[in-house]
Image (tube, helix red, strand yellow):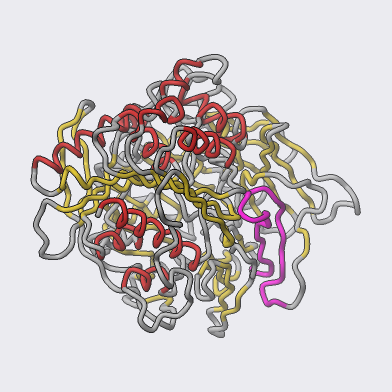
Amino acid sequence: MSDTGTQPNAGTQPNAGPGEGEGTTSSVTTSSGTGASGTGASGATSSGTGSAPDWEKRFRAPRVSLPDWAEDAPDHCLFVSNATGTYELYAWDRATGEQRQVTDRPNGTTDGLLAPDGRWIWWFNDKDGDEFGVWMRQPFDGGGADEPAVPGLEPSYPAGLAIGRDGRTVVVGRSTDEVGTTIHVVRADAAPGETPAEIYRHRESAGLGDLSHDGTLIAIEHTEHGDAMHPALRVVRTDGSTVAELDDSEGGTVELGLEVLGFAPVDGDTRLLVGHQRRGRWEPMVWDVATGEQTDLALDLPGDVSAEWYPDGSALLVGHGFEARGDLWRYDLAGRELTRVETPRGSVSGATARPDGTVEYMWSSAAEPPVLRSTSGKVVLDPPGMKAPRSVPVEDVWVDGPGGRIHALVQKPAGASGPLPTVFEVHGGPTWHDSDSFAAGPAAWVDHGYAVVRVNYRGSTGYGREWTDALKHRVGLIELEDIAAVREWAVASGLADPDRLVLSGGSWGGYLTLLGLGTQPDAWALGLAAVPVADYVTAYHDEMEALKAIDRTFFGGTPEEVPDRFSASSPLTYVDSVKVPVYISAGVNDPRCPIRQVENYVDRLAARGAVHEVYRYDAGHGSLVVDERIKQVALELDFAGRHLG
């Protein structure tokens, strides 16, 4: 929840994991003597649930997200659910209990925002998961048709949205390949046909952070210094004039970043909650943008720490992540007192403080499906219908690696003893991490008799800034060194059968899968890569501009400036060394890992008769359609079953 109604900037983020894009229709291609079409999992797209296996039920079980709520109408809420079989936005009036579906698109919708007065719902309208589109809006009560929210702005990638409490001011962040980032102020009282005022423009990646409670100040995250991993901050007035600047990177010479966490929810209050890395990890501080005063909170918690304001501005709701688990705390600003908010052991994927002082949070563990809880003791939203079956808990493993101790999470069938066929499920991002949270994909492998190992390799978040930043310049190769170290442990410990090791992942995890199959050709028996980077040079030229900025930071330049680095980190360089069967799935509208570079890699496999299968679907970077996601997992299970024996 944000008091002005703010959609976080999406324009500066690296590649997300699969399942965050969209898509339904598809095609399957089989090549080089595999002897099967790759569609052998019967019933994979059936919507029935009567005799469905547990792994499929985990995908089909109705889920809800943590509801966003309107600051000046807190009974008006917006959430995401898969109740219809496709993830869509839903409105919920807590006063009446009424819920209604807001969006209904073939490939789903998850990007939405409530206006602070609760009267309007904004949602982002892209095309088949390409993430390029415009903002639409409709009345909260459903009493009107969708309409373009900002008629004067052309389609773009989103780079943040903030709606003022005055009902007249809207700030829109946009990203395009041609221009870079622009930020615009839209006035409800503008003359018909008047173009929204552009207050910011830069070629490098940037995005809208927040709009102050009184609608007079705008916080911007930018990477004008050229380091897309370590943003700086600028606060401007609505006319674009600068109020304050904060740059811990010192012009890109120091690897320290900042992030906007939100303005104080009080009129005239110029305090901005900011995330910083000054002690080698993410922590919050308070920056008064009018006086320049910075208040270091120095919270005595290990790991990464984030925060948001309580609705009255007197305290902070602190989110704490450490060693793949998360919990919550309340920090009283006046007394500088930190108090634990009791949550079960596991992961908290989102939380919000309500006006009555209670906290609502989404909790799960690897064994237990997600539950939307409240500190009042109640379950906030419990969708009707089938409940997701439980899975098995994770075991924590620490392995000595070339860059320090590596944390891995291990699941295996209950009561099973090794050696087992083992899937190394590699997370995306790369600035992300696997956690003790419920995940239907790994659980499906466990149900089929596999052990699953998830590695928080160098590049992952949650283990300090140096761990996250270590992948630069030797992109992909650093991560694979850590995966190799955990692989050696898995075999030596007796967990994993060395002849039945699967390297698998989506997005950045798919990239590492293809790179690993080429650089470690004798280590793996099979590869499964979803929406991967396969040809890094072509991927760079075809991907959205914000990701180009990330890649320039990772590699220290463009493919033309540092060709050897791109070549050393591109799966295409090593494709002729791949010895094992490869399965690849890709969305034809994917703006993050575009299809052309995948086809380049596949063509090279086909040219030498390598065993591979390719699944193409009419979507972007994954799918929001439950049937489609189940089909993709079924195809992976079938491919592994046929080739591992």
Residue 24 versus residue 306 in the image, above or below: below
Residue at point 16% right, 47% down? 496
The quadrant in which residue 581 appears is top left
Q: Does the magenta segment cover residue 136?
A: yes
Residue 31: tell me if it is visible. yes
Residue in the foreground of this view, choosing between 10 and 452: 452
On the image, which quarter does residue 157 sit in?
Answer: top right
Of 310 and 257, the residue lying toward us: 257
Percent x, y for residue 477?
A: 34, 27
**On screen, 165 above or below 571?**
below
Q: Is residue 609 above or below residue 98?
A: above
User: Relative to residue 297, is residue 66 drawn left or right?
Assistant: right
How many marks overall? 0
Q: Is residue 633 left or right of residue 264?
A: left
Which residue is found at the position 68% from the left and 42% from the top? 174
- Which residue extends farthest right? 192
**Percent coordinates x, y for residue 589 in the rendering:** 62, 48
Q: Which residues are magenta?
A: 118-142
User: Magenta stretch: residue 119 in it?
Assistant: yes
The quadrant in which the C terminus is found is bottom left
Q: Position of residue 475 (x, y in %)?
A: 40, 27
Q: Relative to residue 391, is residue 200 drawn left or right?
A: right
> 514 or 359, which is in the foreground?
514
Task: Judge whether residue 278 can be spotted in this image.
Answer: no
Q: Is residue 224 above or below residue 64?
A: above
Q: Residue at x 55, y 70 (%)?
A: 77
Q: Position of residue 52 (x, y in %)?
A: 36, 77
Q: Residue at x 15, y 47 (%)?
A: 497
In terms of depth relative to the viewer, which is nearer, 448 or 485? 448
